[in-house]
Amino acid sequence: MSRSQIQIFDTTLRDGEQVPGCKLNTSQKLIIAERLENLGVDVIEAGFPVSSPGDFESVSEIAKIIKSATVCGLTRAVENDIKVAAQALEYAKKPRIHTGIGTSDSHIKHKFNTSREDVLERAFQAVSYAKSFVEDVEFYAEDAGRTDNDYLARVCEAAIKAGATVLNIPDTTGYCLPSEYGAKIKYLKENVKGIEKAILSCHCHNDLGLATANSIEGVINGARQIECTINGIGERAGNTSLEEVVMILKQHPYLKLDTNIKSQELYGISRLVSDQMGIYTQPNKAIVGSNAFAHSSGIHQDGVIKNRETYEIIDPKDVGVTESAIVLTARSGRAALAYRAKNVGYNLTKLQLDEVYSIFLQFADRKKEVDDSDIHKIIESSKVYNEIISA
Ligand code: KIV
Ligand code: ZN
């Protein structure tokens, strides 16, 4: 089996920015867009141009500065949205219009109060109209996760007939199980006439914590694009996290699925997005959380000091983190204390370590984390201090 390339479609600046209170201005978006291009994303979804003059301006300015990635603008299946998106994308080297409509029975009845046939026709018309402006048109079937597969296949066929180059299958409400989502992609691959003319895209939300797992099942079953955000930010519980899917594919090479992402840039861009949006990243967040490469229990610390791979499946340098952290707490053992003491300049013998360790434990019971300056204080207060410094 040859290796396949998975396109990374970043929607930090559109779906990600829908986090309440995290609105970015145009200059902040430009900074992030440049970093996304440097990271190696294939597509940048820059915004929803018709939604506000600010969004229009951001998409238009991003379109001007991005050199090699595709720049994409979101629309509803509404002519004016599509026309405005085309205007915002005028200067993009590679423009893409992302248009679509809700296809689940719930959306058809409650949002549109119409019929499946009408939605199918609107999907066809929207893609055809977008195609009159740009060659690259992505169609989304909103709430595809809860859309009946036969009907979804018919909608996809209509979008392909109208010229769609990408078919986005969003699990908008984050409802699907990985097995269901994977089976949906497989069903579409096998049952949509003309599917070879378009690629399938996964767009998964994280309401049940399954966005990453669903996206991976999607690409295992034939999708060739993943839509995701830095730090997994987005509406409600967020979107698929870019750093997670990228590192899963990298750490499981037998899947033979590659991306163009420079993984060493992941930690830096995670910090940038978190700072610009003023949104804190949880410490235990996979790949980029502050504890992702920190070890605090004595058994784990001893293992990692002997060989990093005992408790780490990723080399922190591969994601731009300089080194694993050995955190000193009351749970730490002698090996961790000796290691950290050595880093700040003390080479302790076994007997000296026994003495210093007993003081350390009393200290660590009073303080949550023991830092480098505490190590100096602990050693200075020990009765072996003179012996240690004169060695
Ligand atoms: O979650 C979703 O369905 C979306 C579409 C607008 C692509 O974000
Ligand atoms: Zn979404």
Image (cartoon, grey):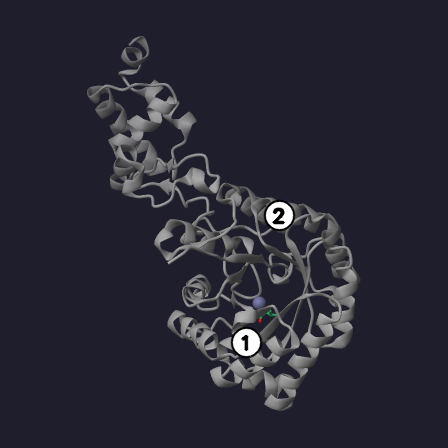
The reply to whether residue 78 is in sight is yes
**Callout 2, which amino acid?**
Glu
Quadrant including the C terminus: top left
Sort mark 2 into few (<14), some (14-19) or many (20+) by Cα contacts within 10 Å.
Answer: some
Left or right: 208 as drawn, with respect to 31: left
Q: Position of residue 144 (x, y in %)?
A: 53, 77
**Callout 1, which amino acid?**
Gly
Q: Nearer the viewer, residue 300 or 213?
A: 213
Instruction: Please give the label number shown on residue 37.
Output: 2
Q: Who's the residue at 43% across and 62% down the image?
A: 216
- 1 or 2: mark nearer the eye: 1
Q: Nearer the viewer, residue 203 or 311?
A: 203
Total number of numbered discs in the rendering: 2
Among all residues in the image, which is located at the extreme top? 390
* Quarter of the view holding residue 218: bottom left
Q: Nearer the viewer, residue 8 or 353?
A: 8
Q: Who's the residue at 41% across and 45% down the image?
A: 292
- Earlier along the polypeptide chain: callout 1 or callout 2? 2
* Quarter of the view holding residue 344: top left
SS type, badge 1:
loop
Q: Position of residue 358 (x, y in %)?
A: 25, 29
The residue that mark 1 highlights is: 194
Q: Is residue 320 above or below residue 210?
A: above
Q: Position of residue 256 (x, y in %)?
A: 40, 55
Q: How far apart are the alpha carbons under marks 1 and 2?
A: 31 Å
Instruction: Please give the label number shown on residue 44.
Output: none
